[in-house]
Image: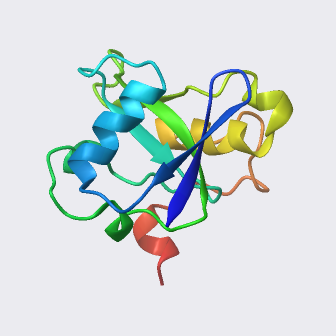
Amino acid sequence: MFVTILFGDGQMEMFNLNCKLINFIHHLKERCGLDFKECVELMDSSGKVMDLEARQRSVAPACSVLAERHFYVLLRVCRDDDTGGQKYVSLLNNYSQSHPELTELLRKLSDPNKEPDGKTRRGRTKRSNKNLSK
């Protein structure tokens, strides 16, 4: 069981899922050249963040969070001083050229309440997320 992590200048690394999540995250940071104090996340191809930050000390198996044979993009979690929330920064360089679909996904992750510039629908106001689930 393995996953492939995309990062850097088009780099791909395969990681074994047969380990505890705490060890997986430690090994991920080590192999990708990151400081162990940094907060990191993984995003799948649909834009879903795997919530590693909340599980960074978990002894649950990594395969309980990550799907085998999937590709994930490595993200750095930063604090947004303007909003007080979280901001995700892709650690895959030039992703807008190699994976253009990630540009919008990352924007939505970092600011889920903001609508894309210049895109309104016939004067309608934005509905809250509560109304979308009906």
* 126 or 24, nearer to the observer: 24
* Image spot of residue 130 (x, y percent): 40, 70
Measuring 27% from the left and 42% from the top, which residue is drawn there?
A: 53
* 43 or 6, nearer to the observer: 6
* Image spot of residue 68 (x, y percent): 52, 67
In the rendered view, does 43 fall on the left or right side of 29? right
In the rendered view, does 4 fall on the left or right side of 87? right
Residue 7, quarter of the rendered image: top right
Q: Is residue 104 above or below residue 61?
A: above
Q: In this view, does 72 lie above or below 129?
A: above
The colour mode here is rainbow
In the rendered view, does 20 fall on the left or right side of 103? left
Q: Is residue 27 above or below residue 91?
A: below
* 71 or 134, nearer to the observer: 71
Measuring 68% from the left and 21% from the top, which residue is drawn there?
A: 93
Query: In this view, which residue lies farthest toward the bottom?
Result: 134
Measuring 60% from the left and 61% from the top, which residue is drawn there?
A: 70
Query: In this view, which residue lies farthest toward the right?
Result: 97
Q: Is residue 34 above or below residue 72?
A: above
Total numbered circles = 0
* Image spot of residue 110 (x, y percent): 48, 35
* Image spot of residue 91 (x, y percent): 56, 25
Whether residue 111 is visible here, answered yes or no, is: no
Residue 29, quarter of the rendered image: top left
